[in-house]
Image (spheres, rainbow, N blue to C red):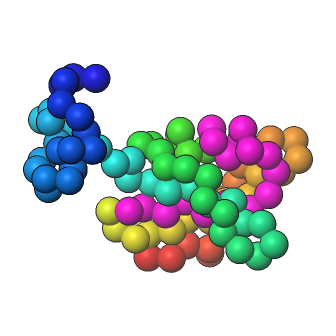
Amino acid sequence: MCCDDDVESRLAKHSRPCCEGVSVFAPLDIYAIQDEKPQWLGSSETLEKALQLMCETGPGPYVVSSQETGHKDFYVMSADGLVSPLPGQTEP
């Protein structure tokens, strides 16, 4: 970590991040769709890392949502580990 201050105390004080150019929150949320409901898997800084999380989780449908823009992309991972976007399944 680039600073010694406790992150939670800095957030509680509503101060800016302790390091210039370092975001405290990852901008992408990843959800697996299970029983037609989104199950939050975690957050990611990049789409590549989001796709890796999908591969670690297993086959099925996924949603990647941007915390910054609200844009959502839908993906499906096949049983052989291929992740593909679902055409026409994005939400601005």
Q: Is residue 15 above or below residue 6?
A: below
Instruction: Tell me where residue 82 appears, x and y as whole percent.
Output: 77, 44
Residue 49: say if magenta: no
| Image side of residue 71 versus residue 59, left or right | left
Residue at 53 percent across and 40 percent down: it is: 48
> On the rendered image, what quadrant is the N terminus found in?
top left
Instruction: Tell me where residue 56 appears, x and y as whole percent.
Output: 72, 38
Instruction: Tell me where residue 65 appears, x and y as whole percent.
Output: 49, 63
Residue 62: say if magenta: yes
Is residue 87 among the parts visible in the rendering? no
Task: Provide the residue span drawn in magenta.
Answer: 52-67
Q: Is residue 81 above or below residue 77?
A: above
**Count of picture labels:** 0
Residue at 62 percent across and 74 percent down: it is: 89
Q: Is residue 49 above or below residue 61?
A: above
Q: Nearer the viewer, residue 75 or 26?
A: 26
Q: Nearer the viewer, residue 1 or 69?
A: 1
Is residue 31 among the parts visible in the rendering? yes
| Image side of residue 63 versus residue 79, left or right | left
Residue at 53 percent across and 39 percent down: it is: 49
Q: Nearer the viewer, residue 34 or 9?
A: 9
State the image quarter where residue 68 is shown: bottom left
Instruction: Tell me where residue 46 appears, x and y as whole percent.
Output: 45, 43
State the image quarter where residue 84 is shown: bottom right
Residue at 55 percent across and 65 percent down: it is: 73
> On the rendered image, what quadrant is the C terminus found in?
bottom left
| Image side of residue 76 versus residue 63, left or right | right
Q: Residue furthest right?
A: 79
Q: Is residue 35 above or below residue 66?
A: below
State the image quarter where residue 88 is shown: bottom right
